[in-house]
Image: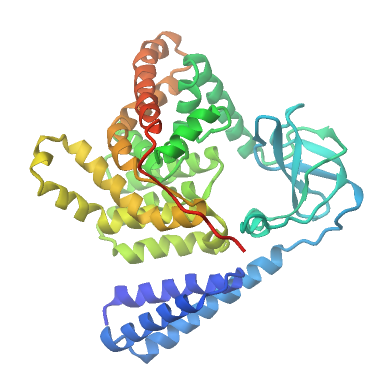
Amino acid sequence: MPTPLRTNIYLGSFCLGILPAAGVLLKPLTMAVLLVVALYLLLIKQVGWICLILSLFFLAAGFYYTKAWRQIRTISHSYSTQQELIGTIVEPPDIRADSEFLTVQLQKDQGKILVKAARYPVWHYGDTIRLKGSLEEPASFSGFNYPLYLERFGIFATMPRPRAIKLVAKDQANRLLGSLFGLRTYWEGVIQDALPEPESSFLAGILLGSKRAIPQNIQDQLKQTGTSHIIAISGANITIVLGLLLQVLPLYTPRSKLTSTIAIAVFITLLTGASASVLRGSLVACLGSYLRARSRRAWTTAFILSSMVLLLLGNPLLLVADPGFQLSYAAFAGLAYIGSPIKQGLEKFQISERLPEIIKSSFAETAAATFGTAPLSLGLFGQLSLIGLIVNPLILWLLPLTTLLGLVVLGSAWLVPSGAILRLPLWALLHAILGVIGIFSRLHFGVIHLTLAHE
């Protein structure tokens, strides 16, 4: 039996073992499918009983690892009682129109809580605050497992209505992360000074993953046209940034490229807050660079599963409680498996000869990612935008140049004349992208809606 197949079986079994440990009940249809797959591997692929027994071992390993991981991190709180707590804000505040959400690490090993505070005063990463109020236990709503989602961040309680919040001290969290978050805030200011709205907030989303200043109507247009991924730092954004930086840097050996890729990926990950899609994109970029440095070719399925397992070892709940992680890997799988076939099929049409290569590549990548994420999009959000198959190829080829000009503007912020020269073409590109998205968002077709029936 080929080694890649055994590797895929073991890695897949580990991932499968995480599901019941995270409270996901496998339905009879799913169990039947798994049984058919096991019989197929045994009878057709002739994997052998030893391989199947080892797969059960990895299945158990995934189950018990997740159980232990959750048990170690579980914190119990006293709910529905007024109390006074002291803790430090350990994530950049999530600022909304009329409120802000604070992730607070409590003192005396009491774990993290999520606090919904008023919009003002503004709190910052590293602020130690004194809270007065009652803790509440997170509850599921509309079929969404909110407690599990918060547990993925290590949060087991919320304080939605604190009676009072008082500053105790500043800069009490990780100094390195504080500096990086401060740099991101500074760059957000540079972008706001360089460009008018909504182009400035749109560029901040592309480069820094900052969505809080993007007008709601623009966010709605992005969802309607299936282009929200543009303002969420993802594998595609990281690939673009890494590609541009690696071309500019004087790198001549595979080892120097690998070292630079790791350093840039770590910097981007920490700067943007280490979301699941960023972690996936950075890890895949580093693994790909490592294989190129070793002059090795990756097995597609094993490459996808191994990168997934590495991230799940850090946080197994990503697999079931983080939509960003799920969609990122679904898009990645779509690109890996059907990206090239779609492009080859497109070449057979006569009209494709008149299309630029970059348009054909963008269409193939968009179609592959859309097909990969379609089941999840319908299941998670009850909506799937097919307009993205048209819109994405029209705008994605502009992103590398837009990203390059944006990076130059950020890097030359202290050189006012240099940055000013690039502002007009940068604004024009952003305005054109937003214009295309706005036009297609007004077309009321191409969006599939599914009514979700929640228990």
Q: Which quadrant of the figure has residue 297?
A: bottom left
Residue 318 vs residue 168: left or right?
Answer: left
> What's the residue at 29%, 56% (across, down)?
336
Q: Position of residue 264 (x, y in %)?
A: 43, 40
Of the 4 image quadrants, the one containing the N terminus is bottom left
Instruction: Please indicate, yes or no, whether residue 239 appears anywhere in the rendered image.
Output: yes
Residue placed furthest toward the top: 417
Q: Position of residue 442 (x, y in %)?
A: 40, 30
Residue 337 vs residue 265: left or right?
Answer: left
Q: Which quadrant of the figure has residue 291?
A: bottom left
Q: Check the image and tell me how it is coloured.
A: rainbow
Does residue 73 lie above or below 248 as drawn?
below
Q: How many discs appear?
A: 0
Does residue 274 lie above or below 33 as drawn?
above
> What's the residue at 38%, 23% (across, down)?
430
Q: Position of residue 239 (x, y in %)?
A: 36, 42
Residue 146 vs residue 213: left or right?
Answer: right
Does residue 358 lie above or below 3 as drawn?
above
Residue 265 vs residue 347: left or right?
Answer: right
> What's the residue at 36%, 56% (across, down)?
372
Instruction: Please indicate, yes or no, whether residue 287 appears anywhere in the rendered image.
Output: no
> What's the residue at 31%, 45% (across, down)?
366
Residue placed furthest toward the bottom: 49
Q: Nearer the viewer, residue 32 or 134?
A: 32
Does residue 4 lie above or below 277 as drawn?
below
Q: Position of residue 455 (x, y in %)?
A: 62, 64
Q: Nearer the viewer, residue 351 or 134?
A: 351
